């Protein structure tokens, strides 16, 4: 017989006002001693099970045929702030007001419980009034009891009410693990409440105040939000939702992105992806891709220049994209007229086009942007931090390394390679799957287009849609090099890098001139960019009072490094944490030394760096940190395409969004979207990545300061904007597909 160990106990009861007996179908007002109570929680010595005694609210024990639910959760709270669910038990009925249940743990979770500094049991009782048909629980009760350890960092607030029901004030209440799925929380004040590790899936949150609430590790799937609330996606987990969004398109899909190409978003003849399916059913599709990293290979539309461009393997996915969409255009669905197609390179007004946005049903039939009052129910935009290019096996490429290593200089060298896409640019099907024996453990088919940690906000706001669609049109036409769209003065949440004008303010710099390069200040250019990304980023960091969490792919901008350092250092002493990806120094086995990281940690910023390799089955925990996001004090944030690099915020085309979970977004320090889900998803993913077993804490290494930038940045550009010969037709002509030799000496990609 197992010996039992009764662990230290402390109690918390969340409370609320109960309804009156006059409410149809709702039980009469209960006795004063009613409510949910966790009477005891007893764990076995091995931690493999916990026996819980609960006193449920007698007034809400349903009669036959009435809807109720009883949930017990066992949670562990780590020193790093994560909440992990160790066990859960849900019942549709309670046998009596006093109940006993056993939570059983896996061997792994039992070990975690035995070592836990703090663990709690949360009991949630829910009751659905039989007088309505919405299947939501109007009455909810939550009680908490400590199973192991002391409260630690969790501040237990003695709430003054006992029910989570309409009009209840639970601001600041400690309710970790509350199982409030499908709850009707209309009018409930949960501002700054701690719901970490719980669930609000399917809950009615239209008038719920969640300002500053701790929703880390909280499920919000299919919750009903206010009309102004914007949806949020976390990648890689939510990648298929991008496919679903494109599947809703009725008239147009416009994509502007840095890297692109893969089996799910685009597809091939044998297996059409979301964009091919859209074209086949009559949706017009335009794709505008960056091509600014090809040095001097791609300089114009003449045959010779484009032929040179065609041999550049990094552009293979672009031409494969066009081949797939043209195939779909030639094979419409039965009874349908295929949509129009245009694939083009991006505007020359910017050093690179790094924006990552998908616009759905925001264009008129002629390609011009819809006005705010002309949007249709399916009009939306996915504003993202991530590209949509299959990784690590690049879709559309003719050759790819199957195995390789880094040499002494850090350059990747192939030791053997797979021949992919032997039909060259017009056979994307050939790029998925190996035509030779794969290396041991390798993924031989194209992986999904969402392999990195990234975020996306699904925008429905008409004014924002109109603005983003108008900029797409301006960039597609390569409007003259003058200040356009007045983006620097935006009073909306859209946050742009919009290039930098010549020092006299006359125009953007011409490509291949000394003024046209990134990396640092340039006397030929104005000192401030035409976009608002730099100013808004610095204002958000400066507004933080208690906490700052930061994702980024680059940490090279001196102003941002200084702002983060100032936040962490006294007298502000903000808790600043940064998660990024980095390479290992193969000699020291530590993250590569960085002058910027040295400045941050010296000021008190905590930096965790995730190192790893491609996500083959041998390393499933690894995820590349590509996101660009900030959350200040759990309330205000940013996500978008902008990296913390001088060039990104000064020279590029970038788009991000300011976010807030304030009940009144107008009180945010910067114009912001109401996006409780956006703030929550960034925080949840951050805590997971912060605690990753692959994360290494960066320690001061005294790296030398970087050399001042010199020379040009990216050189030649492919120029295929609509203004070049297309006139007012925004769907043609597309990139020319050249007749190329059927074979070419294969070379490994370096």
Image: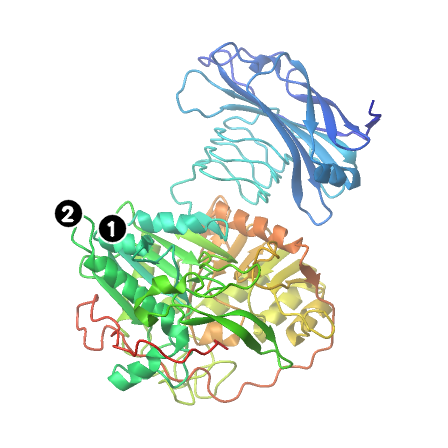
Residue 477: percent from the left, percent from the top? 26, 72
The residues tagged by marks 2 and 1 sit, at their Cα atoms, a distance apart of 31 Å
537 left or right of 602 in image = left
Residue located at (66% from left, 33% from top): 87
Residue located at (40% from left, 80% from top): 745
Residue 475: percent from the left, percent from the top? 31, 70
Is the residue marked by circle 2 packed among few (<14), some (14-19), or many (20+) residues within 10 Å?
A: few
Q: Quadrant of the N terminus?
A: top right
Please, what secondary structure does the residue beneath circle 1 have?
helix
Residue located at (73% from left, 24% from top): 51
196 left or right of 341 in image = right
In the depicted structure, whether residue 633 falls above or below residue 427: above
Q: Which mark is residue 335?
A: 2
Residue 58 in sight from this viewpoint: yes
Q: Which residue is mark 1?
A: 373
Place residue 739 in its image quadrant. Answer: bottom left
Coloring scheme used = rainbow
In the depicted structure, whether residue 684 falls above or below residue 614: above
- N-term-proximal mark, 2 vs 1: 2
In the depicted structure, whether residue 473 falls above or below residue 208: below
């Amino acid at each position: 017989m197992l010996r039992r160990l009764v662990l230290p106990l402390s109690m918390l009861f969340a409370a609320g006002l109960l309804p009156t007996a006059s409410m149809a179908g709702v039980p009469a007002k209960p006795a004063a001693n009613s409510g949910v109570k966790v009477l005891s929680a007893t764990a076995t010595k091995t931690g493999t099970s916990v026996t819980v005694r609960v006193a449920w609210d007698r007034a809400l024990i349903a009669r036959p045929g009435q809807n109720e639910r009883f949930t017990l959760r066992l949670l562990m709270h780590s020193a790093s702030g994560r909440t992990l669910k160790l066990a859960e038990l849900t019942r549709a009925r309670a046998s009596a007001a006093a109940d006993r249940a056993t939570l059983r743990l896996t061997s792994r979770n039992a070990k975690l419980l035995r070592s836990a500094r703090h663990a709690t049991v949360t009991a949630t009782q829910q009751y659905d009034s039989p007088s309505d048909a919405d299947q939501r629980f109007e009455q909810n009760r939550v009680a908490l009891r400590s199973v192991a350890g002391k409260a630690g960092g969790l501040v237990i607030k003695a709430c003054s009410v006992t029910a989570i029901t309409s009009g209840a004030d639970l601001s600041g209440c400690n309710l970790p693990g509350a199982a409030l799925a499908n709850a009707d929380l209309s009018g409930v004040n949960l501002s700054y409440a701690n719901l970490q590790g719980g669930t609000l899936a399917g809950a009615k949150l239209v008038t719920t105040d969640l300002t500053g609430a701790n929703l880390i590790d909280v499920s919000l799937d299919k919750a009903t939000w206010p009309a102004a609330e914007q949806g949020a996606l976390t990648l890689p987990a939510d990648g298929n939702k991008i496919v679903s969004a494109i599947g809703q398109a009725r008239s147009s899909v416009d994509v502007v992105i840095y890297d692109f190409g893969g089996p799910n978003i685009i597809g091939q003849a044998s297996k059409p992806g979301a964009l091919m399916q859209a074209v086949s059913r009559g949706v017009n599709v335009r794709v505008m891709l960056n091509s600014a990293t090809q040095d001097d290979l791609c300089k114009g539309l003449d045959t010779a220049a484009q032929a040179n461009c065609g041999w550049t393997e990094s552009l293979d996915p672009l031409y494969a994209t066009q081949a797939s969409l043209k195939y779909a255009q030639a094979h419409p669905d039965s009874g349908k007229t295929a949509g129009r197609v245009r694939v083009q390179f991006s505007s020359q007004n910017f050093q690179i086009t790094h924006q990552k946005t998908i616009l759905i049903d925001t264009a008129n039939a002629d390609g011009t942007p819809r006005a705010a009052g002309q949007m249709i129910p399916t009009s939306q935009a996915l504003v993202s931090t991530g590209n949509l290019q299959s990784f690590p096996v690049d879709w559309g490429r003719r050759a790819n390394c199957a195995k390789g290593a880094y040499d002494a200089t850090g350059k990747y060298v192939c030791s053997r390679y797979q021949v992919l896409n032997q039909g060259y640019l017009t056979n994307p099907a050939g790029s998925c799957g190996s035509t030779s024996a794969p290396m041991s453990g390798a993924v031989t088919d194209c992986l999904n287009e969402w392999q990195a940690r990234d975020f996306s906000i699904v925008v429905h706001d008409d004014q924002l849609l109109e603005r983003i669609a108008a900029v797409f049109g301006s960039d597609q036409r390569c409007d003259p090099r003058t200040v356009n769209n007045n983006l620097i003065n935006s009073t909306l949440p859209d946050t742009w890098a919009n290039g930098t004008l010549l020092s006299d303010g006359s125009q953007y710099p011409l490509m291949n001139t000394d003024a046209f390069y990134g990396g640092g200040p340039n006397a030929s250019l104005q000192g401030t960019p035409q976009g608002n990304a730099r100013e808004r980023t610095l204002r958000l960091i400066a507004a933080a009072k208690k906490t700052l969490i930061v994702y980024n792919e680059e940490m090279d901008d001196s102003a941002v490094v200084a702002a983060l350092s100032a936040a962490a250092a006294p007298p502000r002493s903000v808790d600043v944490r940064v998660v990024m990806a980095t390479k290992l120094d193969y000699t020291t086995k530590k993250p590569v030394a960085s002058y910027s990281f040295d400045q941050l940690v010296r000021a008190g910023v905590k930096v965790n760096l995730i190192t790893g390799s491609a996500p083959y089955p041998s390393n499933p925990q690894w995820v590349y940190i590509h996101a660009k996001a900030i959350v200040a004090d759990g309330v205000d944030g940013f996500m978008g395409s902008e990296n913390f690099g001088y060039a990104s915020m000064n020279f590029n085309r970038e788009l991000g969004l300011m976010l807030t979970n304030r009940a009144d977004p107008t009180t945010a320090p910067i114009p912001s979207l109401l996006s409780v889900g956006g703030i929550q998803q960034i925080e949840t993913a951050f805590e997971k990545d912060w605690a990753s077993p692959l994360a290494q804490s960066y320690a001061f290494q005294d790296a030398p300061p970087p050399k001042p930038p010199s020379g040009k940045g990216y050189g030649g550009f492919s120029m295929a904007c609509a203004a070049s010969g297309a006139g007012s037709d925004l769907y043609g002509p597309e990139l020319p597909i050249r007749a190329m030799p059927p074979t070419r000496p294969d070379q490994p990609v370096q």
